Amino acid sequence: MKRLLLAGAMATLTFGASAQQQSNPRDAVPDKMPNDIPYGAPISLDRAQAAINAAIAESKKRGWKLNIAVLDSGANLVAFARMDGAQLGSIQIAEHKARAAVKYRRETKAFESGIQEGNLHYLLTLDDVIASRGGIPIVENGQMVGAVGCSGGTGSQDEVVCKAGADALMKR
C-alpha cells in the first residue's frame, strides 16, 4: 500500500511539474531580443534642457510640482530641474527612473506592470530597477540617447510629464 501511495504521489509531482513548465510564459524563448535598441551618442545639454522645458510646461499647465531629470545614454545626469514646491524625496527618484529607462531600454512602466499584473517579482532583484512609471527613454534615429525621469506626483502624473519632455525632442 505504501508503494502504491508513493508511486501516486511521484506521478502527481511529475505531472504537476510538467504541466506547470508548459504553462509558464517565462519559459517561452523569443526569436529576437526585446528592447534591443542600440545606445547612441549621449544627449547634449541643449537637447536635455529642451526636454526639461517641455516637461515643466506640461507640469505647470496641470498645476503639478515635479522633479525632472534627463540622463544621457551612459546613465549620467545631464540636466535636472526641481520645480518650486516639489517634494525633496522625489529628487533621487526622478534620477532613478531615468537611469532604469536608459539601462534597461524601456519605460519604467514595464517594471510596474510586470510586478503588478505579470507576477514577475524577480524584477525586484535586478540592479537599478524601479517599478514605478515616470521613466521614459529618449530614442533618436533608432538609438538610445538618454531618458527623462519625473517624480513628485502619482506615477501616472509623472508619466504624462515625462512623455511631454521626451516627445518634444521627437518633434524637432
Image (cartoon, helix red, strand yellow):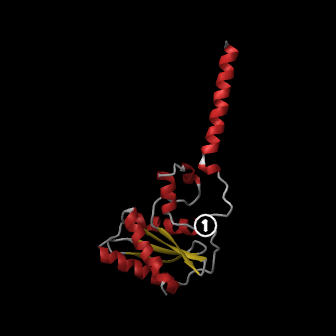
Report the side of 16 relative to 51 (left or right): right
Q: Is residue 15 above or below residue 65?
A: above
- 101 or 27: which is nearer to us? 27
- 121 or 23: which is nearer to us? 23
Report the side of 82 relative to 10 (left or right): left
Q: Residue at x 65, y 18 (%)?
A: 5
Dot 1: element: loop
- 73 or 6: which is nearer to us? 6
Q: How many marks?
A: 1
Q: Please state which amino acid type lies under the numbered disc 1.
A: Asn
Q: Residue at x 41, y 82 (%)?
A: 53
Image coords of residue 2 (percent x, y): 67, 14
Image coords of residue 54 (percent x, y): 41, 81
Q: Identify the image quadrant of residue 153.
A: bottom left
Q: Identify the image quadrant of residue 60.
A: bottom left
Q: Is residue 118 above or below residue 110?
A: above
Report the side of 47 relative to 81 (left or right): right
Q: Which residue does the numbered mark 1 point to in the structure image?
A: 35
Quarter of the figure with the N terminus: top right
Image coords of residue 28 (percent x, y): 65, 52
| Farthest-out residue, top | 1
Q: Residue at x 51, y 66 (%)?
A: 107
Are there few (<14), some (14-19), or many (20+) residues within 10 Å of tag 1?
Answer: few
